[in-house]
Image (spheres, rainbow, N blue to C red):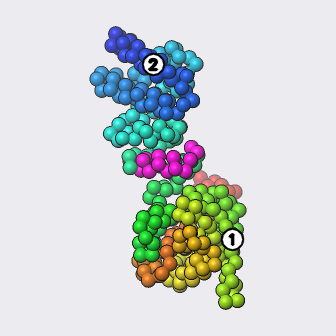
Amino acid sequence: MEELINADYKDWLVEIKSKIRSSQIKAAIAVNSALIQFYWDLGKMITEKQAQTQWGDGLLMQLSHDLKREFPEMKGLSYRNLNYARQFYQFYKDAIVQQVVAQIPWGHNILIISKLKNLEEAQFYLQQTIENNWSRDVLGLQIKSNLYNRKGKSVTNFKQTLPKPFSDLAQQTLNDPYIFDFLTLTTKAREKDIENQLIRHITQFLLELGKGFAFIGQQYHLEVAEEDYYLDLLFYNVPLKCYVVIELKNTKFIPEYAGKLNFYLSVVDDLLKKADDRPTIGMLLCRDKNNIAVEYALRDMSKPMGVSEFQFTEILPENIKSSLPSVEELENELKNLK
């Protein structure tokens, strides 16, 4: 790195060290906004210096070495982290997001700039992280499950059945599809089996449903004209201030499902809904659907409802498992091929 050990670099290094001291980053290391601002400034200084000179990544190696020697007690000065600082600045430099990114930890920011290429998508996850107080692991799961492209995508009739802006808020509450990868079931599992596993994993279920869902009951009993009816799952959504009825169908959507759900919503509005509650919303979760058929089925329904697909991890039935070759059989086949 001899080419870096010159007067220009030494002057610039003094400027970097002065920046660290003047921002009092050592004292403010636990204050997230100060730390994020420091990494932003550092990334900007590195980007600008590399643009002005012919110094490549060797600059980061030398800078890391010099800074760690000057500030041995300070973390975050490794080559890798300096590279993240540069990447962080370059990712956001053309967007007005400094106040937003400063509200989440540095580890969350690293995850976003490492996994995403689209600025609009990054801003979505930034906002969702702040609103939902996601941990880094939860943020990673939401990025992996592609929440950005699922949020608000359920086929609904909310525009026809709910006033604005409540209809828009309700639309953004429903996803399509829902990813229940914490469930392991066969393709032919009964709806009751799916219900039971969802309740058994209620924390993950609520996380996938989104912010504000409070679980009320499974197979919730309603009596109408001396007849018994049971809702698969009943929730209350606090931000929407309404009941939410969820019906599970481990089959492809058929129009009859919408009619039954419309009936349930009418009953809940009459028997459970309070005067200050908003209209009850229905969610049909099916394994498959045709969006055009769903739109026709919902068009003339009087109650607000949406239809989404759901996915879970499928396990092979025993009769199929038994027909698959074992590891030993595969090894013997390979030996015979030699």
Give the residue type that dot 1 points to: Gln
Kindly report the secondary structure that dominates the magenta region of the rendered protein. helix
Q: Position of residue 90 (x, y in %)?
A: 37, 35
The residue at the far bottom in this view is 225
Q: Nearer the viewer, residue 197 or 5?
A: 197
Is residue 211 in the magenta section?
A: no
Q: Which mark is residue 149?
A: none
Label 2: which secondary element: helix
Q: Position of residue 62 (x, y in %)?
A: 44, 18
Which quadrant of the view contains residue 282?
Answer: bottom right
Q: Residue at x 61, y 55 (%)?
A: 334
Disc 2 or 1, which lies upstream in sequence?
A: 2
Q: Position of residue 277 (x, y in %)?
A: 56, 69
Q: Position of residue 38 (x, y in %)?
A: 45, 28
Mark 1 highlights which residue?
218
Would you say 326 lies left or right of 172 here?
right
Mark 2 highlights which residue?
22
Which residues lie in the magenta part? 121-136
Tell me the crowding category of disc 2: few under 14, some 14 to 19, or many 20 or more residues within 10 angstroms, Cα based.
Answer: few
* Badge nearest the viewer, 2 or 1: 2
**Relative height, residue 126 to residue 36 (above, below):** below
Which quadrant of the view contains residue 164?
Answer: bottom left
Q: Are marks 2 and 1 in contact (CB under 8 Å)?
A: no
Q: Residue at x 42, y 47 (%)?
A: 123
**Relative height, residue 81 to residue 207 (above, below):** above
Label 2 to label 1, Cα distance in Å?
Answer: 58 Å
Give the residue type that dot 2 points to: Ser
The residue at the far left in this view is 52
Would you say 169 lies left or right of 320 here?
left
